[in-house]
Image (cartoon, rainbow, N blue to C red):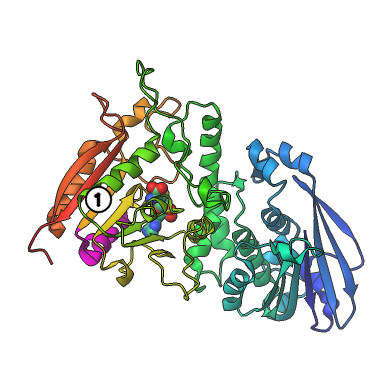
Amino acid sequence: MLLTITTTLPPASDLGFLLHKHPDRVQAFGQSFGTAHVFYPEASRERCTAALLLDVDPVKLVRTRGKGTPDFSLGQYVNDRPYAASSLLASAMASTFRTAMRGRCEPRPELAARPLPLEIVLPALPCQGGPRQAERFFAPLGWTVEAEPVPLDPSFPEWGDSRYVTLRLSGETRLADALNQLYVLLPVLDEAKHYWIAPDEVDKLVRAGEGWLAGHPDRALITRRYLANRRGLVRAALGRLADADDAPEDALDRDPLDEEPPPADPSAFGPVPEAPEAEEGAQAAPPPAPLAERRVQAVLETLRAERARRVIDLGCGTGKLVARLKQDDGFEKITGVDVSYRAVQIAHRRGLPDPYRPDRVPRVEIHQGALTYTDERFRGYDAAVLMEVIEHVDPPRLGAVERVVFGDARPRVVIVTTPNAEYNVRYEGLAPGAMRHPDHRFEWTRAEFAEWAHRVGAAFGYGVRIVGVGDDDPEVGAPTQMGVFTKESGGS
Ligand code: SAH
């Protein structure tokens, strides 16, 4: 991977002072995963270009287990993609241009403090969402963005574009700001799975984002995507547990933020093949369906029984339930909403309608949205489903979700499913007290869920019934609990 930085402010070769790398030299800096080379293809008074070339050594990368380096412990990851280029580039930038990123330059302090005419080029940047996404992230920072998709194979234009773009940024920015923006946004644009060991990822983001991230219109999206990498750390541990093949079903539930895009073939999109629940003495009967499938079934049955024809799936993830609703013509209008841009993209790739094509007025829609903010698009449905969603919401934000769903959207029926924490003792390999999924903010016992459901029902005028989904264990209950809220007559 290559990054070049050019300035035209005379004497341009002062760029060497700012980067603390002499323009006449070619320097190599060892990284835990390869080598970073810094050199200057041109260094005149009028124009000076510094290049950072990253040479990744796949063997070193796999062996890497150092502190503060990406942990590629999942063999499957290494097979899928030899390296997460953008993360490694960001990491290499941080180590080779550390002082420049802090905005310090003793020989030329005034130069470090002022905006410079800069041109930054990345000939092959992995960029999910293509040129439009690059524009969306960099343009608000004052850059003129030119992003060209790189064709998959120039000899076969009909094959279309790769996930790489050639990115050229030009503008007047402080060098330190430019470097910090790249440090954060390159991995965010790549959205590659990578597992950072560093426990201080939040600090790093706050530091690198100083002066530009807080005012960025996409700060929430950028932060969420950037920190998804943190959650991956816990997932890596769960991933190893899963390899031991006695994993709890929900540990295998794909977090859409961490999920690799599934195959584009929509027919491949059925029930997730998960380990069936271990049921002793049940050999004669066909194995029970996986829990995720039983949840979908329970929700579909409830929606049909309640005669809901217009359904909104809030926190739809990659569209598992939406795809099933779509198969039943009894559902007139189906909408999925998720806060994760990536989940929405994956849902689109699965053949669910693309909201960015306004020429279609679809029966099925998927769009990005947050449940913590009132949204008029959530109104006008018979039923809302929150399947395995509330436990992903920070407890202080749960009240906002309640108001948005029960107070403002106010469908006739609300279906909420969530894990039953008491059942966790039945999952081998799940440490006592641990939760089923690293992104869960809480998991409730049956009493806790009932207490919440009745409180919300009473507050907003909904009757409540709670049923278990999955095999009902005499001691700890069923693995999933489902609350069905029906609006009391007379309610607005
Ligand atoms: N309902 C799906 C996905 C469950 S995972 C299924 O059962 O398969 C939880 C989903 O909730 C994730 O996709 C996450 O992005 C989404 N989510 C979490 N908080 C949200 C919020 N505040 N607004 C919208 N979606 C949210």
Q: Is residue 89 above or below residue 251?
A: below
Task: Give me the residue at 61% from left, 80% from top.
Answer: 142
Q: Is residue 370 magenta?
A: no
The residue pinned by badge 1 equals: 304
Residue at horizontal 75 percent and vertical 71 percent from the top: 121
Foreground residue among 319 and 401: 319
At x 82% / y 65%, what residue is drawn? 51
Q: Is residue 458 above or below residue 124?
A: above
Horizontally, residue 84 falls left or right of residue 487, namely right
Q: Secondary structure at mark 1?
A: helix
Q: Name the residue at the left extreme.
A: 490
Q: Would the CB of label 1 be found within 8 Å of ligand 1?
A: no
Pinpoint residue 197: horizontal percent, then vertical percent: 60, 43
* Image location of residue 453, percent across then percent down: 20, 48
**As rendered, which of 444 and 50 lies closer to the eye?**
444
> Which region of the structure is painted magenta?
396-412
Residue in the picture at 38% in, 40% down: 293
Image coordinates of residue 220 in percent, x first then y, are 47, 65
Residue sitting at the far top: 281
Q: Choose between 337 and 121: the one closer to the eye.
A: 337
Residue 167 visible in image: yes
> Toward the viewer: 241 or 410?
410
Q: Residue furthest front?
A: 329
Q: Is residue 253 above or below residue 288?
A: below
Q: Quadrant of the N terminus?
A: bottom right
